[in-house]
Image (tube, helix red, strand yellow):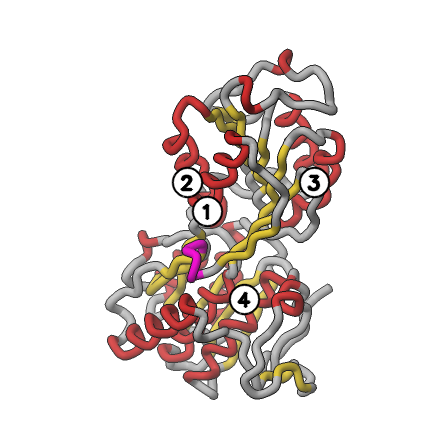
Amino acid sequence: MISRRSLLGAAATAALASAAPAQDGPVTVGFVYVGPVGDGGWTFEHNEARLAVEEEFGDTVETVFQESVPEGADAERVMTQMALSGADLIFATSFGFMEPVMNVAERFPDVKFEHATGYRTADNVGTYSARFYEGRAVQGHIAGAMTETNKVGYIASFPIPEVIRGINASFLAARAVNPDVEFNVVWAFTWFDPAKEADAATALIEQGADVILQHTDSTAPQAAAAEAGDVITFGQASDMSEYAPMPRVSSIIDNWAPYYIDRVGAVIDGTWESQSVWQGIGEGMVVIGEITDAVPDAVRAEAMDLQERIARGETHPFTGPIARQDGSDWLAEGETASDETLLGMDFYVEGLTGEIPN
């Protein structure tokens, strides 16, 4: 059953092809989550943004959500139920929800949809994502400077461009400060599975990694690192500050609230239009969590300077010369990667080992 603050009666929405006009009463906004709201990471931050929407708009908005929705047929069923029950706007918060979003949006042309990290749009479907790779470059700098074994472990979720960009960005930043650093990437093939994530972190630590990066959503890698001792980690999507000052020495925080408030406001005032948004540190959608005292002062200053230069647009994490993993040229001296290339990134940069799975 859909968890809810409140929900318009299903009787008010008898037809598949229409939803209750937003102007006729409170706007109903649905949120579809791939993980539990208590994951401490990705879904936690999306839910914090939902709560911010409620606080911003009060009784003019009603929100509904469903957590731990698998990417596939279940997602389509959940979104269909939300649309039938009167949702005016639905946020689908995982890449794998893309096909379900497009299918449901076609059947409900009067319902607005926003798909996180996707790339397909329609008149009633917009997309939004964050330039997480900017934050991962800051993490990579700290990781490269602090590793003593020169071995960094990376827990990756799925081999999609978003994840590959993060691996490449953090590796390039780590190599810039430490030419001897090596990355060992483990593919977990999950966004949220604490047992798998903990096993991956433990395996990487046993192989000599004293830094663990992650693109999965639970705090299990933090717990594994804390148990091992002398291993540093970084919060993913949320601050994960319960593990600070060690092993969690900083974090990438996904700040969705301003965007959600803006888009709900557009539905309320009738100005919502399909768009594709990709924002980063400069716009405040990607936030670098507090860098703890476990990080040496000089390294902290360098990381903060890198963060500020990225925010001002003075530094791009993908600036040449950069070659692909096979040694072929990619970016010339001083050249920066285009958004088109980054959005479709399906290759490792030179220096990374291993293969990207299909």
Q: What residue type is labelled 3?
A: Asp
Mark 1 and mark 3: Cα distance apart in space:
22 Å
Vertical placement of residue 40 versus 152, above or below = above
The magenta span reads: 281-285
Q: Residue at x 37, y 53 (%)?
A: 240
The residue type indicated by label 2 comes to: Glu
Quarter containing the C terminus: bottom right
- Mark 2 or 1: in front is 1
The residue to which callout 1 is attached is 256
Which residue is located at x 51 percent, y 39 percent? 263
Residue 296 locus on image (x, y percent): 26, 76
Per the model, the C-alpha gap separating discs 4 and 1 is 19 Å
Percent of width and height locating residue 36: 50, 40
Question: Disc 1 marks which amino acid?
Answer: Trp
Q: Tell me how far mark 2 sits from mark 1, CA to CA.
A: 8 Å
According to the picture, the residue beneath numbered tag 2 turns out to be 48
- Mark 2 and mark 1 in contact? Answer it, CB < 8 Å: yes
Q: Position of 179 compared to 350: left or right? A: left
From the viewer's perspective, is the residue at label 4 or at label 3 nearer? 3
Q: In the shown orientation, is residue 63 left or right of residue 327?
A: left
User: In 3D space, how far apart are the residues under numbered discs 2 and 3 (Cα atoms)?
Assistant: 28 Å
Marks 2 and 1, the one that precedes in the sequence = 2
Counting other residues with Cα less than 10 Å from the Cα at mark 1, is it few (<14), some (14-19), or many (20 or more)? many
User: On residue 221, which mark appears?
Assistant: none
Residue highlighted by disc 3: 123
Q: Residue 166, which numbered label?
A: 4
Sequence-earlier tag: 1 or 3: 3
Asked if residue 221 can be seen in this view, the reply is yes
**Mark 4 vs mark 2: which is more N-terminal?**
2
Going from N to C along the chain, the mark reached first, 2 or 3, is: 2
Which residue: 54% across, 22% down?
A: 23
Query: x%, y% of residue 104?
Result: 72, 34
